[in-house]
């Protein structure tokens, strides 16, 4: 049985279009840098009658001038420094580049510390049970493997914006 010409042409066209996205893989560890980093504990307001603070990190990504990359995906893992115990993951599906860099990226965990009022948020940061955290910033392009770009310690400072 012979294939229809239109079916063959459609198959070749589909293969050609799908390979348009199959450019040369980019070594993200070498091609992309994390910049303009700031971190702290964001005041998430009152939840279930308790003050809540969540870890937050803000940064930009910069790519080398010779890199052809329109966007990447990110996965941020929030972990406790003293034990490497995992607290939360936040996935960002697509971060577009505007020229050689991204707009500022703000990522906040849903996990956080809570405290009963009248304890202030600043007092929460000084509590003896408070544990410091860091965030691992992982990136990937299309179907490539996740690559760790940088680890950032969450500063023990209160953020309101």
Image (tube, rainbow, N blue to C red):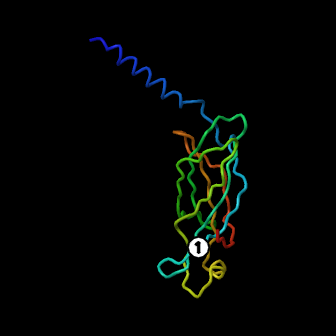
- Give the left or right position of residue 113, taking residue 12 as reference: right
Q: Residues within 10 Å of mark 1 (few under 14, many from 20)?
A: many
Q: In front here: 128 or 40?
A: 40
Indicate whether 138 appears above or below 117: above
Q: Position of residue 10 (x, y in %)?
A: 39, 21
Furthest residue in direction left, as rendered: 1
Q: In front here: 24 or 66?
A: 66
Indicate whether 108 appears above or below 14: below
Q: Position of residue 106 (x, y in %)?
A: 62, 59
Q: Residue 6 lies in what quarter of the image? A: top left
- Give the left or right position of residue 115, taking residue 32 as reference: left
Residue underneath mark 1: 53
Quadrant for the C terminus in the image: bottom right
Indicate whether 101 appears above or below 44: above
Q: Residue at x 68, y 71 (%)?
A: 156
Q: Position of residue 154 (x, y in %)?
A: 66, 65
Q: Residue at x 60, y 30 (%)?
A: 24
Q: Say which element carries label 1.
A: strand
Q: Residue 3 lies in what quarter of the image? A: top left
Q: Position of residue 55 (x, y in %)?
A: 60, 67
Q: Residue 59 lies in what quarter of the image? A: bottom right
Q: Residue at x 67, y 73 (%)?
A: 158
Quadrant for the N terminus in the image: top left
Indicate whether 154 appears above or below 45: above
Q: Residue at x 67, y 49 (%)?
A: 61
């Amino acid at each position: 049985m012979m294939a229809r010409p239109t079916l063959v042409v459609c198959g070749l066209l589909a293969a050609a279009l799908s390979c348009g996205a199959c450019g040369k893989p980019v070594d993200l560890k070498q091609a992309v840098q994390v910049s303009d980093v700031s971190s702290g504990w964001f005041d998430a307001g009152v939840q279930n009658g308790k003050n809540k603070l969540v870890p937050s990190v803000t940064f930009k990504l910069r790519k080398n001038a010779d890199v052809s990359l329109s966007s990447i995906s990110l996965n941020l893992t929030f972990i406790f420094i003293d034990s490497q115990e995992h607290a939360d993951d936040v996935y960002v599906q697509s971060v577009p580049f505007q020229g050689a860099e991204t707009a500022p990226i703000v990522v906040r965990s849903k996990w956080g510390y809570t405290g009963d009022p009248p304890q202030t948020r600043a007092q929460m940061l000084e509590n003896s049970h408070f544990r410091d955290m860091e965030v691992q910033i992982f990136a990937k392009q299309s179907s490539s493997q996740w690559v760790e770009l940088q680890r950032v310690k969450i500063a023990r400072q209160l953020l309101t914006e």
